[in-house]
Each structure stands twice: as C-alpha cells, then as structure tokens.
Image: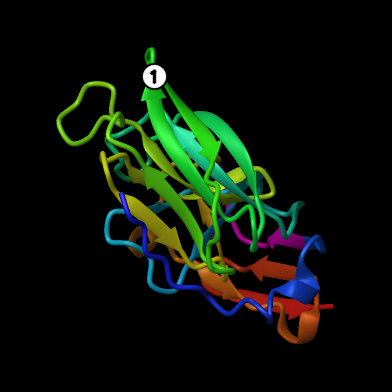
C-alpha cells in the first residue's frame, strides 16, 4: 500500500517540547462529586476520532487540585471499538512518538491482540500518523478496538479501528478544562461540557483556574 502524508509546521511547538505544564484548579462553588477534567481539541480532527478525558482529579468544593503533564507525544491503542460519551476506551498499549522520525506507527492484529510497530521510511515531519493494516478488525467485528494519539503517556484522541486506513493527527494541542463526572480514559462529548480553553500565552507553563459555579477565571504565570 502507498501512503501519502502531508507534513505539519511544528516550529512553534519545538521550544516547548519536554516542558512541564501545570494547572491548579480551585472549586469555589457548591458543585460536588465532579472531577477537574482536562481534554484536548485539535485542528482538523478526523470525523471518526473522539477526545478522551486525558487528566482527571476529584474536585471538592473549597479545594484546589493540580493537574500536570510534560509536552511529549505517543501513540495509543484501546480495546473499545464502540466509542460513545462516557465509555472508557480500554487502554491496551502505548508507543512513544516524536514530531520527526518516530512520528508514524503501524497497527496490526495478531493472535487476539493489537500491536504497534515502527513504520520505516521517510515521512514528513510534524504529522502524527497511524497506518492500520488489513489484519485490523473493522466495523461490525467483535474484536474491534481503537487507536490514536496521546500526550505524556495518556490518550488524548482515539478512533475506532478500520482495516487499511491511514489516520493522521495534527499535534497542536488545544487544552480544555471542565468540572464533570468523566474519569480519566473516558470518551468526552465536548458539547455536553461547560469547558474553558487554556491558552498558555507567551510560552507560560503554569495556569490557575477558579470556578465560582457559573464562570471560570483563568490566570497564567
């Protein structure tokens, strides 16, 4: 099979690679029984791909919790092929990724298990891509799973597996924060959340978010 990929300009991301990011979340409301949840958006996300509750910690009224991560990338696979709001994607494996050289992975299915492999050859920088071979279970298959990308070892986006398909992802993250019942690893329906976007302007890596029950106040340092 011939694979055609278009590169992505990631010059703006390079200075932040490996940087530690932190968000402290203060719940100044009466909202209880919710997690502080970070999920991501992405420009040009595939129609079949869904965002995952990437980081989550219980946020009780009057408390502050911290979510932190390193800006690094990976490929992820899961056992869940029926992806809908709130379902766990079924983490099944992670493969380290880079924005050049190690930015393409292959996915196959052998002896009842999904497996990643490094795709050799020359690939354009920036794009993160998964080549699903013809052994991968697709629509209607009992063993259908999911595959996608993640950050700092945790899934951010997955799509149901489909044989012979190439998946491509733009690595530019959009960070979204909400208080919700999602656990880490669950599929998120962004339209069902009251999420606020975190921008980290000017290369800043620390944010403080405060929720008063109606609105968010965000600051950076």
Most extreme residue toward the top is 111
Asked whether residue 183 appears in the rendered view, the answer is: no
Magenta range: 22-36
Tell me if mark 1 has few (under 14), some (14-19) or many (20+) residues whose alpha carbon lies within 10 angstroms of its own: few
Q: Nearer the viewer, residue 88 or 11?
A: 11
Q: Residue at x 66, y 56 (%)?
A: 98
- Relative image position of residue 118 (x, y in whole percent): 56, 41
- Relative image position of residue 172 (x, y in whole percent): 57, 71
**Snapshot quadrant of residue 164:** top left
Tell me the element at label 1.
Answer: strand
**Snapshot quadrant of residue 80:** top left
Q: Residue at x 69, y 74 (%)?
A: 13
Asked whether residue 46 appears in the rendered view, the answer is: yes
* 217 relative to 113 in the view: left or right: right
- Relative image position of residue 155 (x, y in whole percent): 54, 45
User: Which residue was labeled with disc 1?
Assistant: 110
Secondary structure predominantly adopted by residues drawn in magenta:
strand
Residue 29 vertical placement versus 152 (above, below): below
* 38 relative to 20 in the view: left or right: left
Q: Nearer the viewer, residue 106 or 41?
A: 106
User: Which colour style is shown?
Assistant: rainbow
* 25 relative to 139 in the view: left or right: right
* 128 relative to 189 in the view: left or right: right
Q: Is residue 34 magenta?
A: yes
Q: Is residue 114 magenta?
A: no
């Amino acid at each position: 099979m011939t694979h055609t990929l278009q590169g992505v300009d990631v010059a703006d991301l390079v200075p932040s690679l490996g940087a530690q990011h932190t968000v402290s979340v203060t719940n100044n409301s009466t909202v209880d029984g919710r997690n502080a949840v970070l999920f991501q958006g992405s420009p040009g996300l595939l129609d079949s791909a869904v965002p995952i509750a990437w980081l989550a910690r219980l946020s009780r009224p009057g408390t502050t919790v911290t979510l932190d991560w390193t800006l690094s990338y990976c490929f992820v696979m899961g056992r869940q092929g029926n992806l809908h709001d709130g379902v766990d994607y079924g983490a099944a494996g992670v493969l380290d990724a880079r924005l050049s050289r190690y930015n393409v992975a292959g996915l196959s299915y052998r002896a009842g298990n999904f497996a990643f492999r490094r795709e050799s050859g020359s690939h354009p920088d920036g794009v993160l891509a998964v080549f699903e071979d013809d052994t991968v279970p697709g629509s209607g298959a009992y063993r259908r799973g999911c595959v996608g990308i993640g950050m700092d070892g945790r899934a951010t986006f997955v799509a149901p597996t489909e044989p012979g398909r190439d998946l491509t992802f733009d690595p530019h993250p959009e960070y979204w924060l909400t208080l919700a019942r999602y656990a880490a690893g669950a599929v998120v329906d962004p339209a069902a959340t009251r999420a606020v976007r975190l921008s980290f302007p000017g290369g800043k890596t620390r944010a403080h978010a405060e929720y008063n029950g109606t609105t968010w106040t965000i600051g950076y340092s």
